[in-house]
Amino acid sequence: MKYFSIYIPNAKTNPAHKPTAEFKEKMDKFVGEAIARGEFLSGGGFLPLKSHGAVVRRTNGKHSVIDGPYTEAKELLGGFAMLQYPTREAAIEGAKRFMDVAGDGECITYALMEQEECLDEQAAA
Amino acid sequence: MTAADLNRTIAAVWRIESARLIAALARIVRDIGIAEELAQDALVAAIEQWPQAGVPDNPAAWLMSTAKHRAIDKLRRDELVQRKHVELAHELESALDDTNVSTEAALDDPFGDDLLRLVFTACHPVLNTEARVALTLRLLGGLTTDEIARAFLASEPTIAQRIVRAKRTLSEAEVPFEVPRGAELIERLGSVLEVIYLIFNEGYTATAGEDWMRPQLCEEALRLGRILVGLMPDEAEAHGLVALMELQASRMHARTGPNGEPILLLKQNRARWDQLLIRRGLKALALAEKLGGARGRYTLQAAIAACHARARDAEATDWARIAQLYATLAQVAPSPVVELNRAVAVSMADGPRAGLELVDLLVAEPALKSYHLLPTVRGDLLEKLGRNEEARSEFERAAALTRNARERELLLQRAATASKQ
Amino acid sequence: MSYMLLIMEQAERRKNRAPEQKLAELDAMLKFQQSLKTRGIHLGSESLRSLTDGTRVGKPVDGPFVEAKELIGGFFHLAVATREDALAIARECPAAQYATVEVREVGPCNSD
């Protein structure tokens, strides 16, 4: 089953910092193995909202772009991944193993709505 | 919104919407030059009015509606009538007066026919390749003249002239605004694919100048390829081309080191390869093959790129399969460059001596006279065989031939290393 | 270069919406997705199930996610080069009418 997961590092115990060479190596290895097992399909890091993103909301027909200030969690949205696991339990395990490498935080994992015909499977484009 | 924000927003809207806008207008006025002028007029109006009125909820529809009104104004001042036949003016008038056609519907174009017509017109064989590339980037990519000039290291006036002349050529040749059919379609499609891949390659290999690559061009080519696939989902080679570009692009973040130095494929950190693009590329390749395109030139090249993408590390590469694919490509789209690539694959599968035998056959090939990769490959194989003096001289020859500064540095380094052996 | 649109919905609204409304909203999202494909900027998109089918692992981080009042209803991954491009698309997204659309620039996985 496919899952979409968001990882939010804990600002207090795992603050944003430039990754060390050792960290990158560990992460590369982790991701490489996850790819080989068919668990990691794709992923990316999120850049900070304030400088690299925005929030758009529409109220009463008018759009407004909200640039901040944001609550802490929004600033820290670490990254996302598209994953494949046989069971929800395996997804939970995977999240724990990921955070062993990535550090303290929270992984929020959603099952996709249409498993039989995933929206991005329908065409190659 | 600050003035700077607004300008960037307008530029973004233009990039995203201008192709569909120009295509829809071209269907009405049957001339892409006039269609572009009308679209540009609407853009100017947006720049004038949106600071006060705000960005409209549906910017595309606003631009379309404005373009139409500008066309009516022009008509009343008789400019268009003088430019084209009187019939056109009448057609335009009646199209604009058709109050049953809503602005949204005019832009809706659910089967993308207008966009497809625009694609084929911009890539028409009556234009030379440079003109097709410039026109495609301008009309379909929404790039400014300046952006195109910078991408191809030409001057802005040169590109501007190129585009003006291209439109005039199409107008004078009375090229119809339509999608070709049957045998002509296949041939013309080849021209479209060629233009898109040329743009991609220019971005991916940056044949001249200081940069190792120009990612923006790759992104543009990918977008054009995906648009084409969306418009022609049954065309195997369109999927093949997108597959090729996605698989190559998947390596973009791994191709340069921390100091901007180029890193060759076999030495890249594969953890940096973009898995999303690899997945998409492999899917597109599978679809191209399913549609019967396994022997298409782009599909074959994509299959080769897929061999690399599937290998967990360089040692796991299926070189025998790559050599086989190049052999097929050599039948389908023979060229000395394909032969050279086949030689490399053979050398990896069967050893440098086997590869060198094939490369030596190409040394006298006139088409490869100024192709820096020939001496590069030869140098590499000679080095592997311990023939270091000869290797050094080949790397030096290659360095002298390349127009890319970074590549030259790399080759001179290899020459120095070989001479130290 | 890519950007992601995260559709942040209120959990209550998701729970209480009528089936016809759900279908209409999904339909609008599909049309939106199709228009992204036509413009060659669609990299991926999904509708997501509620968190009862998913999981939360780790110590909750301060912020709206904790209370589970808000959830991610879906996402669109866009092949666009600038924040303004992404914002222009976000404004068009039908979900902006009933949800908040977060626009995030995506960096390479495990980047420098």
Image (cartoon, coloured by chain):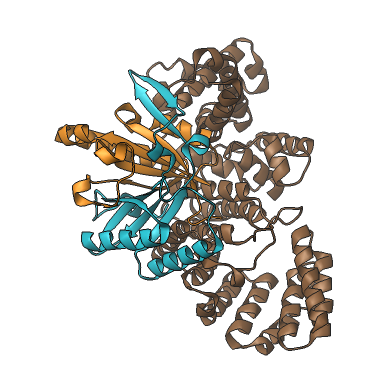
Chain colours: A cyan, B brown, C orange
The residue positioned farthest toward the front in the image shown: A13
Q: Nearer the viewer, residue C108 or B6?
A: C108
Residue drawn where x is 50% and y is 30% of the image: B24
Rendered location of residue B130, percent (x, y): 71, 47
Q: Is residue B151 left or right of residue A57?
A: right
Q: Is residue B416 left or right of residue A89?
A: right
Tell me: residue B221, above or below residue B82.
below
Tell me: residue B97, above or below residue B206.
above
The residue positioned farthest toward the top in the image shown: B76
Q: Nearer the viewer, residue B303 or C64?
A: C64
Tell me: residue A74, above or below residue B100.
below
Q: Nearer the viewer, residue B91 or A118?
A: A118
Q: Nearer the viewer, residue B86 or A112?
A: A112
Quadrant where the image shows the C terminus of chain C: bottom right
Q: Is residue A37 visible?
A: yes
Tell me: residue B269, above or below residue C99.
below
Q: Is residue B310 left or right of residue B261?
A: left
Residue drawn where x is 48% and y is 41% of the image: A48
**Total tally of numbered discs in the picture:** 0
The quarter of the displayed image where residue B159 is located = top right
Residue drawn where x is 57% and y is 19% of the image: B89
Q: Is residue B111 visible?
A: no
Rendered location of residue B166, percent (x, y): 70, 38
Rendered location of residue C40, percent (x, y): 47, 44
Rendered location of residue B303, percent (x, y): 50, 69
Residue drawn where x is 76% and y is 78% of the image: B379
